[in-house]
Amino acid sequence: MISKKMAEKLNDQLNKEFFSAYLYLSISASCSSQGFNGASNWFFIQYQEENAHALKLFRYLDDQNVDLDLRTISAPELEGLSFIGAFEASLNHEQKMTRHLNELSDFSFQEKDHATYNFLQWYVTEQVEEEATLNHIIDQIRIVGNDGYGLLTIDKELGTRTFIDPTL
Ligand code: OFO
C-alpha cells in the first residue's frame, strides 16, 4: 500500500525515466548525424536502459495498485552538441536524476514506506554506476583532446556496447 503523495511522486519519476530515454535517443541521433556511429550506438543502448528503468517503475506501481498517470514527454532541447558535449550533457542530466532519486528515497523513508524505500535503492545504486561510466568516458575524451585518431578510437570502443537489461 502506497500513499497518494508517494504514488504521485513515483508517477513523476516514471515520466522522468521516459524523458531520460527520449533524451538519449535524441543524443544518439545527433551523434549519428556527426559521423560518430559508435557513440550513437552507446546512446541508443542508454535509451534502452532508461526505458527498462521506466518499465521497472511501471511494474512496481501496477503491483502496488496505483492508477498510472502516463503524461506527455517533453521534447529534449539539444543544440549543436559536440562529441564531448553529448557526454557532459548526459552527466549533468544523470546528476539531476540522482538528486531526484535521493529526494524520493528520503520521502519514502519519512513516510515509513519501507517497500518503496527498498525498491528505490536499486535506482540509487544504478545512478552511481551511470555517473561513474560517464565520468570515465569524459576523462578519456579530455585526454585525447581534438586528436581525430584518438576520438575515432574512443568512438569505436563505444560501438562495442551491447544491451543487457539492468533490471533483470
Ligand atoms: Fe539514469 O536515470 Fe534512470 O534511473
Image (tube, rainbow, N blue to C red):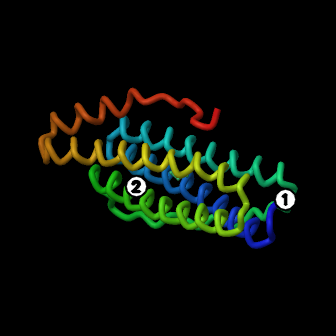
The mark nearer the N terminus, 2 or 1, is 1
Q: Residue at x 69, y 62 (%)?
A: 10
Q: Nearer the viewer, residue 111 or 49?
A: 111
Q: Could you tell me which secondary element the residue under label 1 belongs to?
A: loop
| Distance Cα–Cα, label 2 vs label 1 | 34 Å
Q: Residue furthest bottom?
A: 5
State the image coordinates of residue 9 (x, y, percent, origin top left).
Answer: 68, 68
Query: Amino acid under label 1?
Result: Met
Q: Could you tell me which secondary element the residue under label 2 belongs to?
A: helix
Quarter of the image for the C terminus: give it: top right
- Left or right: residue 20 versus residue 64 is left
Quarter of the image for the N terminus: give it: bottom right
Q: Residue at x 43, y 52 (%)?
A: 27
State the image coordinates of residue 97 (x, y, percent, origin top left).
Answer: 50, 60
Residue 61, compared with residue 6, is above or below; it is: above
Query: Amino acid under label 2?
Result: Ser
Mark 1 highlights which residue?
1
Q: Residue at x 57, y 36 (%)?
A: 166
Mark 2 highlights which residue?
90
How many other residues sit within 10 Å of disc 2, few (<14), some (14-19) or many (≥20)?
A: many
- Which marked residue is nearer to the observer: mark 2 or mark 1? 1
How many other residues sit within 10 Å of disc 1, few (<14), some (14-19) or many (≥20)?
A: few
Q: Find out if the beta carbon at label 1 lies less than 8 Å from the nearest ligand 1 atom.
A: no
Q: Residue at x 63, y 43 (%)?
A: 52
Residue 129: image quadrant is: top left
State the image coordinates of residue 146 (x, y, percent, origin top left).
Answer: 13, 47
Residue 108, compared with residue 30, is above or below; it is: below
